[in-house]
Image (tube, grey):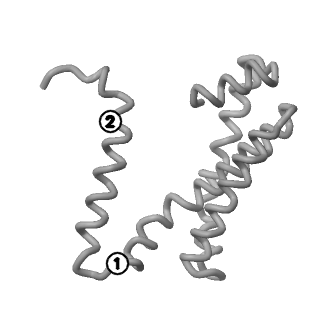
Amino acid sequence: MAGGLYKLCVEELGVNAAQVGVVQSLREVPGLLGFVLGFLVLLLTEMRVMGLSVLLTGLGVVVTGWSGSLGLFIVGTMITSVGFHFFYPSNASVVLMAVGKAEAPKVLGRLNSVAGLRRGGRHAGRLGPG
């Protein structure tokens, strides 16, 4: 769990370590239900799925921020997780639709590079030489 989210749980909601584990476990359930995205794409276009996922993620963040109890915190976390797990697989397809065939490899490469820098920046202090 991210530092700020953990701080919110412990300091504001008075959650103990076992309850944090429950929240973390429940947060991963929408990832296991990824096949729902396949059915959703049959009904909606990729752009609409992307818009829905961004709205769900934002709504989840708002609910999580307003939570005053563990139950509401779990609801907000689950909504955010559903939004994220719908967004992440749809990301590449929407980029491919937005750019031309000639530009697609370059754009996807740049996006993956930026994502790698973001991930690497978090662990840069732990990397040794070579």
Residue placed under numbered mark 2 in the picture: 120
Image-quadrant location for residue 101 = bottom left
Amino acid beneath label 2? Gly
Residue at image point 46% right, 64% down: 91
- Counting from the top left corner in percent of width and height, residue 118 is at 37, 41
Q: Residue at x 71, y 40 (%)?
A: 26
Q: Position of residue 66 (x, y in %)?
A: 81, 40
Residue 114 vertical placement versus 44 (above, below): above
Residue 19 got which mark? none
**Which residue occupies the foreground of this view, 117 or 35?**
117
Q: Position of residue 122 (x, y in %)?
A: 38, 30
Tag 1: residue type?
Val
Quadrant of the image containing the N terminus:
top right
Q: CA distance from mark 2 to mark 1?
A: 27 Å
Identify the element where label 2 is drawn: helix
Q: Quadrant of residue 87?
A: bottom right
Q: Quadrant of the C terminus?
A: top left
Q: Which SS class for mark 1?
A: loop
Tell me: residue 59, above or below residue 70.
below
Identify the mark at residue 99; answer none if there is no mark.
1
Q: Earlier in the sequence, mark 2 or mark 1?
A: 1
Q: Is residue 93 rendered to the left or right of residue 58?
A: left
Q: Are marks 2 and 1 in contact (CB under 8 Å)?
A: no
The relative height of residue 75 versus residue 101 in the rendered view (above or below) is above
| Residue at image coords 31%, 64% | 108
| 104 left or right, relative to 51 | left
The answer to whether residue 97 is above or below residue 56 is: below
Horizontal and vertical percent position of residue 95: 40, 71
